[in-house]
């Protein structure tokens, strides 16, 4: 009996070590992915113009951000009511909007640098807390929420991008319908590009 109890205890301890190790690996992978994205943003800021910045960002947005998950959460119940074609159109439009938004916000390089401050393993993923600096001045605090190796939410100075999207998109759908939301995404993309 004692032998079985010792064996069971050893097995439980071994499993808990494996789970902890897996969490640590996820945290390290998320930090590496974020560091790569930060390096890309510095490169983007050094680019000659908006279209060049957008070209650098487009493929990375699809890899770094879990746009299908962001889309599904942003649209809430509406997501399940959409056809596959509508879902794909929305994911594509949102991917494009994220790329042009980053191209617009990271326009020029003036010594900005990124600091990864802390990582936190949570139930279904990892939160990486970062700070953007210009010289010694803090410009913003960004918390990146990772699940399955990709970002699904960014909280900037305490404001959740995902929550803002969900509120805005839900309101548009309720008032004007899904097609109006798609049209608003297209308009926002065009306006953002025009401001480069």
Image: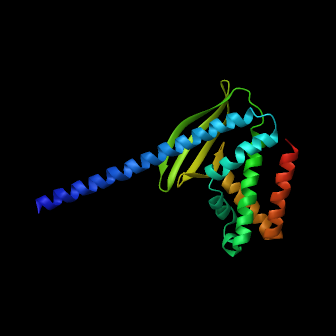
For the residue pair 183 and 131, the one nearer the viewer reads as 183
Establish if 108 lies above or below 7. Answer: above
The outermost residue toward the top is: 135
Horizontal relation, residue 98 to residue 18: left or right: right
Image spot of residue 88 (x, y percent)? 71, 65
Image color mode:
rainbow
Image spot of residue 183 (x, y percent)? 84, 63
Q: Is residue 185 visible?
A: yes
Which quarter of the rendered picture does the C terminus lie within?
Answer: top right
Count of number-bearing discs: 0
Image spot of residue 161 (x, y percent)? 68, 51
Q: Find residue 143 and report its image quarter.
A: top right
Image spot of residue 81 (x, y percent)? 69, 75
Q: Is residue 159 visible?
A: no
Which quarter of the rendered picture does the N terminus lie within?
Answer: bottom left
Establish if 23 lies above or below 48. Answer: below
For the residue pair 168 and 17, the one nearer the viewer reads as 17
Horizontal relation, residue 136 to residue 179: left or right: left
Horizontal relation, residue 124 to residue 190: left or right: left
- The residue drawn where x is 68% and y is 70% is 79
Establish if 59 lies above or below 137. Answer: below
- The residue drawn where x is 67% and y is 24% is 135
């Amino acid at each position: 009996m004692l032998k079985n109890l010792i064996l069971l205890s050893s097995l439980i301890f071994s499993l808990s070590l494996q789970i902890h190790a897996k969490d640590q690996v996820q945290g390290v992978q998320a930090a590496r992915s974020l560091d790569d994205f930060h390096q890309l943003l510095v490169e983007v800021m050094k680019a000659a113009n908006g279209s060049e910045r957008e070209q650098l960002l487009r493929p990375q947005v699809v890899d770094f951000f879990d746009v299908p998950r962001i889309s599904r959460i942003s649209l809430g119940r509406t997501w399940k009511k959409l056809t596959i074609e509508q879902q794909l159109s929305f994911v594509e439009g949102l991917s494009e909007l994220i790329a042009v938004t980053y191209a617009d916000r990271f326009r020029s390089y003036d010594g900005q640098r990124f600091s990864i401050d802390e990582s936190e393993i949570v139930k279904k993923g990892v939160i990486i807390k970062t700070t953007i600096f210009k010289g010694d001045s803090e410009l913003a605090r960004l918390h990146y929420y990772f699940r399955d190796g990709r970002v699904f939410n960014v909280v900037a100075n305490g404001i959740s991008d995902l929550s803002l999207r969900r509120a805005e998109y839900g309101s548009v759908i309720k008032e004007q319908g899904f097609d109006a939301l798609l049209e608003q995404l297209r308009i926002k993309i065009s306006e953002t590009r025009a401001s480069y």
